[in-house]
Image (spheres, rainbow, N blue to C red):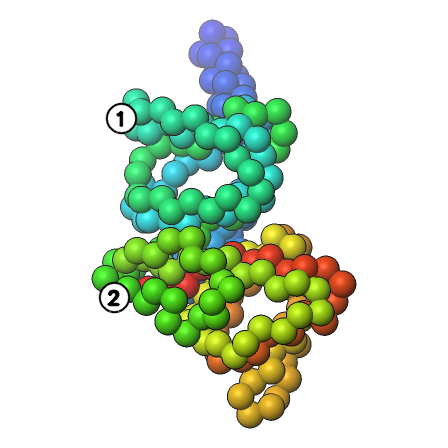
């Protein structure tokens, strides 16, 4: 009887511990990247990718803490749109705040490349966030009803922070619908185009081009 009671108690502890872990959904994967959406309730935690560098785009939250396997702790204040370049490291991300913590994590599955692309191909109004051996990551903003100059993207993950009705006009004159919804995550292939915001809302996108 005591053995059965111990098993029941262990199961209860396992279930309680399990409830402390975040909800994670894989949304994209190919030979270069694995993209997941993570939601942590206050007090919940999510493991950090120990084997892969990554880029994190925060969608919502206030306070968080990174606790590494070596005991190092780092407290974070999170804002929507904050984009972080993270090295591979063992540990957990903990929601220490008072509201759900939501993020998109792009893990890089290759060793990358040391070639630096800089702003090559991109229009001057784009904001470079960072570039390293794993990615070129930048902000795209297009005001309502505005046009972009012609430019060239590489294959990329796009994380939409403010959606808009869009079209891309290709060099040969063809028009492709390109609308993005708020919080949508998508994989888009390399392309040269002019972007046109047809709608009444400003577009805000974080683009992550893996190497």
Whether tag 2 and tag 1 are in contact, CB under 8 A, the answer is no
Residue at 65 percent of width and 55 percent of height = 162
- SS of the residue at dot 1? loop
- Residue 45 image point, x, y percent: 48, 30
Asked if 47 appears above or below 105 in the picture, the reply is above
Residue at 52 percent of width and 35 percent of height = 78
Residue at 39 percent of width and 38 percent of height = 48
Residue in front for this viewpoint, 17 or 132: 132
Asked if residue 78 lies left or right of residue 201, the reply is: left
Asked if 28 appears above or below 70 in the picture, the reply is below
- Residue that badge 1 annotates: 70
| Callout 1 crowding tier (Cα within 10 Å): few <14, some 14–19, many ≥20 | few
Residue in front for this viewpoint, 201 or 133: 201
- Residue that badge 2 annotates: 115
Q: Residue furthest left?
A: 114
Q: Residue furthest bottom?
A: 172
Residue in front for this viewpoint, 169 or 211: 169
- SS of the residue at dot 2? loop
């Amino acid at each position: 009887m005591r053995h059965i009671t111990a098993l029941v108690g262990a199961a209860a502890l396992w279930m309680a511990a399990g409830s402390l872990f975040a909800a994670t959904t894989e949304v994209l994967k190919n030979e270069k990247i694995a993209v997941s959406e993570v939601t942590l309730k206050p007090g919940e935690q999510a493991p950090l990718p120990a084997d892969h560098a990554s880029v994190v785009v925060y969608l919502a939250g206030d306070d968080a803490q990174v606790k590494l396997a070596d005991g190092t702790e780092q407290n974070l204040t999170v804002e929507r749109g904050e984009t972080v370049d993270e090295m591979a490291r063992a540990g957990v991300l903990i929601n220490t705040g008072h509201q759900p913590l939501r993020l998109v994590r792009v893990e890089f599955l290759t060793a990358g490349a040391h070639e630096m692309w800089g702003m090559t191909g991109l229009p001057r109004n784009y904001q470079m966030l960072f570039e390293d051996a794993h990615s070129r990551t930048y902000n795209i903003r297009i005001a309502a009803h505005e046009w972009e100059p012609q430019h060239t993207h590489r294959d990329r993950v796009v994380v939409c922070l403010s959606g808009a009705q869009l079209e891309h006009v290709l060099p040969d004159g063809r028009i492709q619908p390109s609308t993005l919804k708020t919080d949508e995550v998508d994989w888009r292939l390399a392309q040269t185009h002019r972007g046109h915001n047809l709608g009444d809302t400003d577009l805000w996108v974080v683009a992550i081009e893996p190497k």
